[in-house]
Image: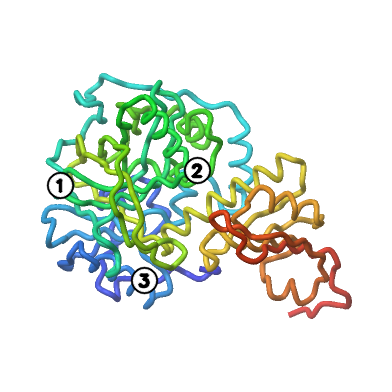
């Protein structure tokens, strides 16, 4: 909020509450948490209310909706991953977190403990969760009028290879079709799709777990483009600086509040449309069939939901891009002070890299690392990009921009290597 105090949403009928009162962990103490007690439908009305609040106040509140008319007795957590909550979950401070996260990534992982006892249910879900009948017991939202139906958007999918290795966390769109059936989109470029190919080659459907409500650091890992080898929970343990306890197969964190289990078949059905993060609908496409085998929830825990393309989803996108880019560049000995991905550019397509030694080597390395980014700015002071471009001279690097394997214009890197001349105005 550019140093301004956060807006007070009580003027719009929300009630400020303590995180524990809302059923949220302590890291949510980093933001104001509200409840909305108006009766709203899970079909569009909850998401529309959040959008209207953001338009009115210039920010999106973290809100627990307590009266979902078509899913009585359930609650929905809107805007579950503001930046301050992610930092609090990491125990890091804005401005120092990139250095800290880079050092943690380079360190040794803590243990990933697999637990089968201690109250774990017969199907492997964590203790404290109650079994439900199916999707109809959950307040899964339809977020936008043009969406093809209700979507699980904040669920973190967990897959493995047939031998149990290669544990992967990722966000995958899940469109609810019926109480025990859904469609899941697995992009061919993802590790989950790679795992599915191995299960299919073995002649078996792929087991899938989807969890929600766990420590937000798991969401940071799930949103990150990490190496396919290894175990994503080991990355989480590095970032958390502590052991991670998981349950079941595919494994889910012990502090998850909602867990879905199912089997992904090598069978496709039409899925969508869906309002994606770039601000446009993804039209109908082929998704894989997901047969639900179990649903469990912690009584009273709110169901997290991300509106793709809005602040919640874009914050995750920019946050993971920033720490991975910083770790990559600093790991190669390049002098980087900060990295920032613009939310206005969907958290992915414009990056500002502050450094005291801007040059084209750094620009090219950044562009090699993040092939999706369209514009890379590299300079000593990018707090005000327009001012920096107006006063610094720069050199540039251009190359084709590829989208889905086709050239779609160019991508550009600028290194602001010529400092401004003259005496700056004092104030």
**Upstream in the sequence, badge 1 or badge 2?**
2
| Residue that label 2 marks | 91
Q: Residue furthest right?
A: 422
Residue 123 in which image quadrant: top left
Judged left or right of residue 178, residue 118 is right
Disc 1/disc 2 C-alpha distance (Å)? 39 Å
Neighbourhood count class around disc 2 (C-alpha, 10 Å): few under 14, some 14–19, many 20 upward: some
Label 1 SS: loop
Query: As drawn, is 291 to the left or to the right of 317?
Result: left
Nearer to us of marks 1 and 3 is: 1
Distance, label 3 to label 2, CA atoms, is 26 Å
Identify the mark at residue 179; answer none if there is no mark.
1
Q: How many marks?
A: 3
Label 3 CA crowd tier, 10 Å (few <14, some 14–19, many 20+): some
User: At 69% from the left edge and 57% from the top edge, which residue is drawn?
Assistant: 353
Q: Going by the image, does 70 lie left or right of 32?
A: left
Q: Which of 424 and 101 lies nearest the eye of the viewer? A: 101
Sequence-wise, the earlier of marks 3 and 2 is: 3
Against 279, residue 194 (above or below) is above
Tag 3 residue: 8
Q: Quadrant of the C terminus?
A: bottom right
Q: Are marks 1 and 2 in contact (CB under 8 Å)?
A: no
Real-space Cα separation, disc 1 to disc 3, in angstroms: 38 Å
Vertical placement of residue 258 versus 64, above or below = above
Closer mark to the observer between disc 1 and disc 2:
1
């Amino acid at each position: 909020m550019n140093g301004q105090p956060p807006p007070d949403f009580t003027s719009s009928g929300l009630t400020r509450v303590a995180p524990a009162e809302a059923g949220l962990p302590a890291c949510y103490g980093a933001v104001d948490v509200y409840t909305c007690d108006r009766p709203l439908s899970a079909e569009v009305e909850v998401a529309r209310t959040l959008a209207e609040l953001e338009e009115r106040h210039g920010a999106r509140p973290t809100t627990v909706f307590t009266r979902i008319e078509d899913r009585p007795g359930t609650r929905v957590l809107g805007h579950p991953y503001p930046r301050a909550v992610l930092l609090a979950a990491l125990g890091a401070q804005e401005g120092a977190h990139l250095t800290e996260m880079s050092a943690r990534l380079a360190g040794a992982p803590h243990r990933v403990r697999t637990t089968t006892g201690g109250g774990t249910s017969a199907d492997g879900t964590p203790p404290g969760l109650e079994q439900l009948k199916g999707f109809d017991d959950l307040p899964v939202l339809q977020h936008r009028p043009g969406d093809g139906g209700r979507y699980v958007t904040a669920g973190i999918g967990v897959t493995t290879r047939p031998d149990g290795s290669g544990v992967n966390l990722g966000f995958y769109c899940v469109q609810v079709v019926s109480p025990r059936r859904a469609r899941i989109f697995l992009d061919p470029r993802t590790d989950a799709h790679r795992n599915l190919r191995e299960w299919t080659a073995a002649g078996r459907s792929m087991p899938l777990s989807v969890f929600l409500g766990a420590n937000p650091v798991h969401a940071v890992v799930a949103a990150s483009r990490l190496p396919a080898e290894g175990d994503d929970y080991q990355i989480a343990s590095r970032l958390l600086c502590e052991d991670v306890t998981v349950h079941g197969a595919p494994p889910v964190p012990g502090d998850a509040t909602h867990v879905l289990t199912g089997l992904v078949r090598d069978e496709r059905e039409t899925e969508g449309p869906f309002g994606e993060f770039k601000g446009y609908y993804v039209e109908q496409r082929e998704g894989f069939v997901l047969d639900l085998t179990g649903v469990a929830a912690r009584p009273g825990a709110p169901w997290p939901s991300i509106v793709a393309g809005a602040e919640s989803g874009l914050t995750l996108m920019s946050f993971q891009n920033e720490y991975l880019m910083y770790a990559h560049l600093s790991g190669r000995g390049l002098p980087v002070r900060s990295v920032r991905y613009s939310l206005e550019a969907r958290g992915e397509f414009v990056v500002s890299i502050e450094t005291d030694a801007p040059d084209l080597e750094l620009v090219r390395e950044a562009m090699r690392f993040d092939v999706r980014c369209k514009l890379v700015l590299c300079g000593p002071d990018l707090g005000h990009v327009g001012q920096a471009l107006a006063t610094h001279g720069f050199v540039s690097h251009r190359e084709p921009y590829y989208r889905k394997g086709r050239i779609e214009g160019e991508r550009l890197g600028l290194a602001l290597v010529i400092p401004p001349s003259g005496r700056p105005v004092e104030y």
